[in-house]
């Protein structure tokens, strides 16, 4: 991409412009013939799953390319955002698990509300305390830890109750049972929220700090999705996702 | 009184002793990362795999030594095999520098390019390691297993809780102490060390005063390789060797370096201990401690655990994020190598 725009900007000769185009066509043709060979020699299932993976990777690479090329931000945490998209699919399209909502829905909502309130309170204390010196750290930490303990004590029994509901098949809250196409929108909103946090943390840092920070944050996201079974079923499959949700 | 002592021993056994050992390992790793950063000015993602590579050579040499029946019991044989690993890792680093990093240095590439190059070297070394030794778990700790067994501690003190110190933990802390002392002596009191600090402080001025940049870079890689091999071997002795683990170790190591202030050796060491102790203290279940201090079940029947152990590695990322938010220059800011 950059090569093209560069050569276009500097007013190139016609040969310089056609050569990359021809090369690209050749490369794409080569890739296509490789896929065809896989299809003929191995199986078309494998060929299509490879093609599928290629397209998904291409979309993610396009995202990185735009972010890095236009904004100059090197984001290593793309997989965290991709994982959020997957979460959106679960949260939007899986059928809700009524028994789980009855068992612990209220506790979870109260826990989440406490968590958000804690974050806001912590930020307010941090802003107010500019002149407190060392007490600023202590006061903020005290607020956040107290809020966190309160949140855990509210949510923990509910989480246990939810994960006990038929753990082999559900054991989570389920989604909203809406068409999967909505999950793209929701996933975008999730990713935007995460991106806001990432930006808040790491913009203005040096480029390689940004890389480490984005990597860390995306790892945190993946850890949360892996281990918070009540939300995403953790590492277990949501196998009705394809059949239960129709466009 | 006994109850308080028991609680103290419990914390000592599950947080202080493992934290000291793990913290030392992280500190050695972070010291290497921070020195590369100070002199070559990039974050070396290949560091975990360099650790793993050195450890792999140590393990192979240990097995060879065990085969011909040489041991330094009660200490682990791996300490005897350490020079082999160090030599190999130094060779690897110098080769990488000569054939990979030098090219980008001459081009004066931006730090991000270096970073991606180092990710590339990470994958290459990782593949090489799995090709040579395979992805399996390997236990190469031999000699005496414990300096102090929990049962012996219980018998001697009459307390209900035991305090166990593994040989690997003792060796780790002692070795780290010696190695860090040597590194600081080198940086502060030798001509070469001073020239390295000068180069890190101001490259152009250092070049003007006649410091040979290639030599400084070479010595930095050598020290990094030595530190990485020692850190990796100690970690492997303590927790058994598995190639993939070292890749996961990379982020806690970066977190240690950044928490302490990148480019600052003292900060790297402090950062290592901060990360190690927070990981352990945040994921430790305080149920039994509370039972000793305030009575069983007074604080409810939960585990009294701030975060489940699933999130052990995530703790270091969270600290990293908090530090980047609150104090991006790290705890020991201001000073550079």
Image (tube, coloured by chain):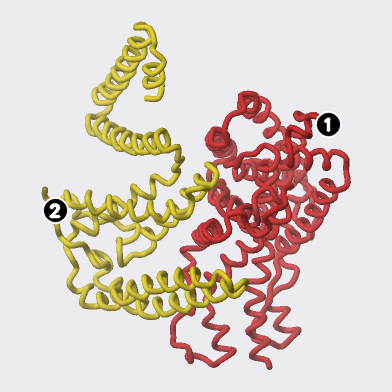
Chain colours: A yellow, B red
In the rendered image, residue B146, in percent from the top left (x then y), is placed at: 72, 67
**Residue in view at x 57 percent, y 83 percent:** B289
- Asked whether the residues under marks 2 and 1 belong to the same chain, the reply is no
Task: Identify whether A190 is placed above or below A53.
Answer: below
Above-or-below relation of B77 to A108: above
Mark 1 crowd level (few <14, some 14–19, many ≥20, 10 Å Cα): few
Where residue B177 sits, quadrant-wise, is bottom right
Quarter of the image that includes the N terminus of chain A = top left
Can residue B313 be seen here? The reply is no
Q: How many labels does the image show?
A: 2
- Dot 2: chain letter: A
Q: Where is residue A218 in the image (x, y as percent from the top left)?
A: 42, 52
Using the image as rendered, state which of residue B70 and residue A127 is in the foreground: A127
Residue at 54% x, 56% y: name it. Answer: B324
Q: Could you tell me if the residues under marks 2 and 1 are in contact, i.e. CB atoms within 8 Å?
A: no
User: In the image, residue B314 lies at what x, y percent?
Assistant: 49, 59
- Residue B212 in picture, x, y percent from top left: 80, 29
For the point 50% across and 72% down, the residue is A128
Vertical placement of B123 versus B106: above or below? below
For disc 1, the chain is B
Residue bearing mark 1:
B209
Provide the secondary structure element on which disc 1 rests.
Answer: loop
A77 to the left or right of B274? left
> Does residue B66 appear to the left or right of B306 in the view shown?
right
User: Of the residues tagged 2 and 1, which is closer to the observer?
Assistant: 1
- Mark number, residue A179: 2
For residue B31, side relative to residue B327 (left or right)? right
């Amino acid at each position: 991409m950059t090569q093209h725009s560069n050569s276009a900007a500097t007013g190139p000769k016609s040969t310089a412009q056609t050569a990359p185009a021809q090369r690209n066509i050749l490369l794409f043709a080569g890739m296509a013939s490789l896929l065809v060979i896989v299809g003929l020699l191995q199986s078309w299932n494998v060929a299509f799953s490879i093609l599928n993976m290629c397209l998904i990777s291409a979309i993610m690479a396009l995202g990185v390319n735009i972010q890095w090329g236009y904004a100059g931000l090197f984001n290593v945490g793309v997989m965290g955002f991709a994982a959020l998209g997957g979460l959106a699919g679960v949260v939007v399209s899986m059928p809700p698990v009524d028994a789980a909502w009855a068992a612990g829905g209220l506790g979870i909502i109260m826990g989440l509300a406490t968590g958000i309130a804690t974050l806001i309170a912590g930020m307010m204390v941090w802003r107010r305390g500019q002149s407190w010196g060392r007490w600023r750290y202590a006061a903020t930490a005290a607020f956040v830890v107290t809020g966190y303990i309160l949140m855990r004590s509210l949510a923990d029994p509910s989480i246990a109750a939810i994960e006990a509901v038929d753990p082999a098949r559900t054991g989570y809250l389920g989604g909203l049972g809406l068409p999967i196409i909505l999950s793209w929108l929701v996933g975008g909103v999730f990713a935007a929220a995460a991106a806001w946090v990432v930006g808040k943390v790491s913009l203005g840092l040096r480029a390689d700090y940004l890389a480490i920070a984005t990597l860390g944050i995306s790892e945190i996201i993946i850890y949360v999705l892996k281990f918070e079974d009540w939300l995403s079923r953790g590492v277990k499959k949501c196998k009705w996702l394809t059949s239960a949700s129709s466009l | 009184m006994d109850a308080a002592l028991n609680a103290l021993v419990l914390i000592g056994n599950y947080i202080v002793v493992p934290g000291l050992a793990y913290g030392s390992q992280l500190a050695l790793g972070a010291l290497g990362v921070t020195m590369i950063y100070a002199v070559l000015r990039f974050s070396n993602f290949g560091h975990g795999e360099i650790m793993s590579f050195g450890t792999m050579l140590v393990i192979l040499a240990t097995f060879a030594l065990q085969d011909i029946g040489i041991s330094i019991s009660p200490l682990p044989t791996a300490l005897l095999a350490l020079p082999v690993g160090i030599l190999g890792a130094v060779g690897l680093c110098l080769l990488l520098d000569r054939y990979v990093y030098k090219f980008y240095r001459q081009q004066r590439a931006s730090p991000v390019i270096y970073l991606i190059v180092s990710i590339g070297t990470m994958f290459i070394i990782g593949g090489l390691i799995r090709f040579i030794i395979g992805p399996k778990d390997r236990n190469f700790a031999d000699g005496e297993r414990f300096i102090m067994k929990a049962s012996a501690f219980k018998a001697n003190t009459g307390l209900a809780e035991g305090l166990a110190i593994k040989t690997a933990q003792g060796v780790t802390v002692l070795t780290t102490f010696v190695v860090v002392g040597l590194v600081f002596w080198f940086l502060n009191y030798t001509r070469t060390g001073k020239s390295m600090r000068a180069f890190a402080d101001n490259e152009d001025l250092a070049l003007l005063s006649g410091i040979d940049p290639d030599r400084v870079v070479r010595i930095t890689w050598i020290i990094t390789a030595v530190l990485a091999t020692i850190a990796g071997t100690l970690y492997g002795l303590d927790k058994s060797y598995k190639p993939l683990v070292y890749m996961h170790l990379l982020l806690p190591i970066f977190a240690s370096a950044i928490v302490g202030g990148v480019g600052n050796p003292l900060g790297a060491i402090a950062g290592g201990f901060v990360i190690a102790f927070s990981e352990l203290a945040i994921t430790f279940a305080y149920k039994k401690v509370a039972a000793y201090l305030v009575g069983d079940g007074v604080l409810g029947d939960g585990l009294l655990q701030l975060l489940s152990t699933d999130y052990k590695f995530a703790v270091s990322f969270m600290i990293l994020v908090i530090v980047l938010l609150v104090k991006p220059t790290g705890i020991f800011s201001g000073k550079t190598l």
